[in-house]
Amino acid sequence: MKASLGIWIGWLAIILAIAGFFYAPFWLGGGALVLGLVCLAFPQKLLAWISIMLGIIVIVIQLFQ
């Protein structure tokens, strides 16, 4: 149960980050960042770091536009 929950949280965070490129970047990028940090508590570290980096990229891109 714990491993599959981490996978779901990681993929949800990645989907939020990708949606953040197109709509509401601060909210969705921030949500991806927070879910990525939550996902670090689970064994899926790669999904967590990908979602954290995507969330940061979404927010930084929005700051420079």
Image (spheres, rainbow, N blue to C red):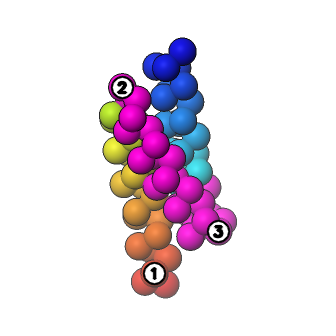
Instruction: Answer above or below: position of 4 versus 8.
Output: above
Q: Residue at x 44, y 38 (%)?
A: 39
Spatial CA distance of label 1 from label 2 is 32 Å
Q: Residue at x 64, y 68 (%)?
A: 24
According to the picture, the residue beneath numbered tag 2 turns out to be 43
Q: Amino acid at mark 2?
A: Pro
Spatial CA distance of label 3 from label 2 is 29 Å
Task: Point out the frontmost of discs 3 and 2.
Answer: 2
Q: Earlier in the sequence, mark 3 or mark 2?
A: 3
Q: Which mark is residue 63?
A: 1
Density class for disc 3 (Cα within 10 Å; few <14, some 14-19, many ≥20) is: some
Q: Earlier in the sequence, mark 1 or mark 2?
A: 2
Residue 26: percent from the left, percent from the top? 56, 70
Q: Residue at x 43, y 83 (%)?
A: 64
Label 1 secondary element? helix
According to the picture, the residue beneath numbered tag 3 turns out to be 24
Instruction: Answer above or below: position of 52 versus 23.
Output: above
Density class for disc 1 (Cα within 10 Å; few <14, some 14-19, many ≥20) is: few
User: Which residue ends up furthest to the bottom in the rendered image?
Assistant: 65
Q: Amino acid at mark 3?
A: Ala
Label 3 secondary element? loop
User: Which residue ends up furthest to the right in the rendered image?
Assistant: 23
- Label the magenta part by its dominant secondary structure: helix
Residue 61: percent from the left, percent from the top? 44, 73
The image quadrant that residue 15 belongs to is top right
On the rendered structure, is 65 left or right of 16? left
Q: Which residues are magenta?
A: 19-44
Instruction: Answer above or below: position of 53 versus 48.
Output: below
Residue 1: percent from the left, percent from the top? 54, 15
Density class for disc 2 (Cα within 10 Å; few <14, some 14-19, many ≥20) is: some
Q: Amino acid at mark 1?
A: Leu
Spatial CA distance of label 3 from label 1 is 12 Å
